[in-house]
Amino acid sequence: MTKFEAVTNYNNFYEFSTDKGAVAPLSKNFVTEPWTVQVGGLVSNPKTYSIDDLLKFGEEERIYRLRCVEAWAMVIPWLGFPLNKLLKEVEPTSEAKYVRFETLYDPKQMPGQNSGFYSWPYVEGLRVDEAMNDLTILSTGLYGKRLYPQNGAPIRLVVPWKYGFKSIKSIVRIDLVADMPTSLWMAAAPHEYGFYANVNPNVDHPRWSQASERVIGETGRRNTLLFNGYEEEVAYLYEGMDLSAWY
């Protein structure tokens, strides 16, 4: 596993800063209580959850690889629960094809949101079948502790077979929708970032290779694994799709 100090001090969280080392100090006073997550859209049982409500789904430890699109990687012991537990409770309708996630928008607390380069708030999305896969979790902690602000407190998504930017942080809203959501990165750089963002060593980013990765805390590089090493669990989701294209 990656050292705790690295996981909590080397962070991509543009709502606070584009400088990985500045995120932790800038977010130290981020207010995460009280907090609610509104779940709605194409569901039969829309609900608003407090963090205490979400913790009632239970917590289990999931030790997952994390692969950043920037070609660095970590191994992190998350605490959380499968997203499918929440989705089953709100009961998606037959029209629901995608899950749209949204981060808190609060430029006073999150100074990076004062940048006009990005379309805030941060938005991400999954297909419903991706969201229902048991590997997809909502995380409430890491290393046996509650999530720190720099890691997406109080609740974040973790989708381990996709590049890390898909695992949206500090979630306040989840909607089931019929149409594919446009994520923040799709809007910011559509020629570089698509909806799926599956880890694939054979599909380079337009500006760098994805064939290898730098694991934080190690010297040298490792070969990138297809679907970040989770091919057996998720490859069936993409049967018939052209994975050589940049999604």
Image (cartoon, rainbow, N blue to C red):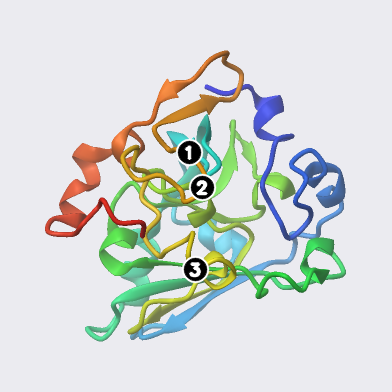
Q: In percent of the image, x 80 and y 60: which residue is there?
A: 31
Callout 1 secondary element: strand
**Mark identifier at residue 159:** none
**Looking at the picture, does residue 90 appear above or below residue 8?**
below
Total marks in image: 3
The residue under label 2 is 164
Q: For residue 43, what is the image quadrant?
A: bottom left
Mark closest to the chain's N terminus, 3 or 2: 2
Q: Position of residue 10 (x, y in %)?
A: 70, 35
The amino acid pointed to by label 2 is Gly
Which label lies toward us, 1 or 3? 3
Q: Position of residue 90 (x, y in %)?
A: 37, 76
Residue 88 lies left or right of residue 214; in this view the side is left
The amino acid pointed to by label 1 is Arg
Farthest residue to the top: give it: 219
Q: Are marks 2 and 1 in contact (CB under 8 Å)?
A: yes
